[in-house]
Image (cartoon, rainbow, N blue to C red):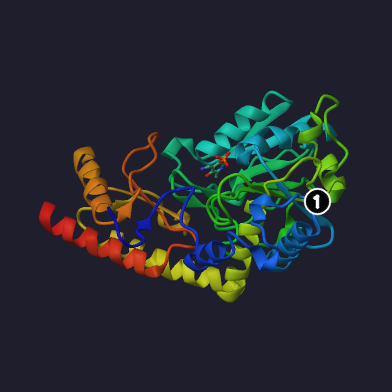
């Protein structure tokens, strides 16, 4: 039992900024004098449409989204995008290239194989996904309909430290675990997508940002709900969108703006991650998994080298209110997910506990 809020290192759904939760709580029963909760509003009502428009404008402003691109508020998670992307985009040439740098990019690539000729442009599987391929290693096909990569590998704790250069081939990025963590040049991307449950909002909302010039190449059997063209034309309201989560995203975006926008967020995230990586580099018990140049600012993976000790660590930490530090079931070890809403104090508390654990188990 905890009487105060814990530091939750979950990979997602994960922590939301406390002021956001407090504001949502204060508005839960009666939003802005409307006498109802946002959850109870019709998605077509004037009150909800104002929230929707505000959230969309905030997202455009925060990410500096150019007029050529349209943000969509969809459902189905990032996983749904694994199918939606090839269905909508592969029609141009029937071919697409994928970089496989972790679990989800591999799954996205496998799903895409149902829809066309898929080529692995690069893979880091040879070294258990501990590194990010360099630009020169990408074997890109000039006639690919798009190139897909995952900008932050949630399970392995690696992050692309550059945006791949693909010439005329549209760049598609799964940014589920690092969207809104730092500035990105949206204009460079054909499509960006992210499940909301890490850096944006509660689970149930999926954000897609698409270059409108890519619309209209969908495969003939593409279901109506999975067509980007339909969703753009209906302004994400072909059916009922995830209304409350869109409202929550708006609150999160306002909070991010208060932190100095994405520039401020990036600076804070680097400071936070440094607390843990610096300790990992000096520890004789714990070791970081990812190569230094590939280290993620969002998901930090580490091991002791002894599975039993790893397990004891995650268990003892959880009892102290440092929860969900167990690594993904497919890789073991530990993982600290330190998205935007994790305060620096959480990292300091984690490192203090790790030092204590190291002294005891040396
Ligand atoms: N891509 C990445 C990078 C992820 O981290 C995740 C979820 N952890 C997914 C895709 C799948 O997301 P969802 O559960 O929203 O379908």
For image coordinates 64% across by 38% down, the residue present is: 76
Count all numbered tags in the image, as a single digit: 1
Image height of 286 relative to 252, above or below: above
Q: Nearer the viewer, residue 61 or 41?
A: 41
Q: Give SS at disc 1.
A: loop
**The furthest residue to the front:** 35
Residue 11: horizontal and vertical position, in percent?
45, 48
Q: Which of 239 and 194 is in front in this view?
A: 239
Disc 1 crowd rating (10 Å Cα; few below 14, some 14-19, many 20+) is: few
Q: Name the residue under label 1.
A: 44
Left or right: 324, with 202 as reference point: left
For image coordinates 67% across by 50% down, the residue present is: 40
Residue 156: horizontal and vertical position, in percent?
44, 44
Image height of 122 relative to 187, above or below: above
Image height of 31 relative to 95, above or below: below
Residue 354: horizontal and vertical position, in percent?
23, 58
Left or right: 190, with 344 as reference point: right
For image coordinates 39% across by 40% down, the residue present is: 328
Ligand 1: which quarter?
top right
- The answer to whether residue 54 of the structure is visible from this angle is yes
Residue 257: horizontal and vertical position, in percent?
62, 72
The quarter of the displayed image where residue 228 is located: top right
For image coordinates 86% across by 36% down, the residue present is: 217
Q: Which of 181 and 32 is in front in this view?
A: 32
The quarter of the displayed image where residue 181 is located: bottom right
């Amino acid at each position: 039992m905890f009487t105060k809020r814990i530091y939750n290192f979950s990979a997602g759904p994960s922590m939301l900024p406390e002021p956001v939760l407090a504001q949502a709580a204060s508005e839960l029963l009666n939003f802005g004098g409307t006498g109802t909760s946002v959850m109870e509003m019709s998605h077509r009502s004037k009150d909800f449409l104002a929230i929707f428009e505000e959230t969309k404008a905030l997202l455009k402003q925060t990410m500096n989204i150019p007029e050529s691109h349209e943000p969509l508020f969809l459902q189905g998670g990032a996983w749904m995008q694994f199918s939606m992307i090839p269905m909508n985009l592969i029609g141009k040439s029937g071919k697409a290239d994928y970089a496989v740098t972790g679990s989800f990019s591999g799954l996205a690539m496998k799903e895409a194989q149902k829809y066309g000729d898929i080529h692995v442009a690069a893979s880091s599987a040879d070294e258990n996904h501990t590194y990010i391929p360099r630009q020169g290693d990408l074997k890109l096909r000039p006639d690919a309909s798009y190139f897909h990569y995952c900008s932050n590998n949630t399970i392995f704790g690696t992050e692309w430290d550059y945006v791949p250069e693909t010439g005329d081939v549209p760049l598609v990025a799964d940014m589920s675990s690092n969207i809104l963590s730092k500035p990105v040049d949206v204009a460079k991307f054909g499509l960006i997508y992210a499940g909301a449950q890490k850096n944006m909002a509660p689970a149930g909302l999926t954000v897609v940002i698409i270059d409108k010039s890519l619309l209209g190449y969908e495969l003939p059997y593409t279901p109506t709900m999975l067509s980007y063209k339909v969703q753009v034309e209906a302004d994400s309201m072909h059916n009922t969108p995830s209304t409350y989560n869109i409202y929550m995203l708006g609150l999160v975006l306002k909070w991010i703006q208060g932190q100095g926008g994405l520039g401020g967020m990036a600076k804070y995230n680097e400071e936070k991650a440094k607390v843990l990586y610096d300790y990992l580099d000096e520890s004789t018990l714990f070791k970081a998994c990812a190569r230094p140049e590939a280290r993620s600012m969002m998901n930090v993976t580490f091991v002791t080298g002894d599975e039993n000790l790893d397990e004891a660590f995650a268990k003892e930490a959880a009892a102290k209110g440092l929860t969900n530090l167990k690594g993904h079931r497919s890789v073991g070890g530990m993982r600290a997910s330190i998205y935007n809403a994790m305060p620096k104090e959480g990292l300091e508390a984690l490192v203090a506990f790790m030092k204590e654990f190291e002294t005891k188990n040396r």
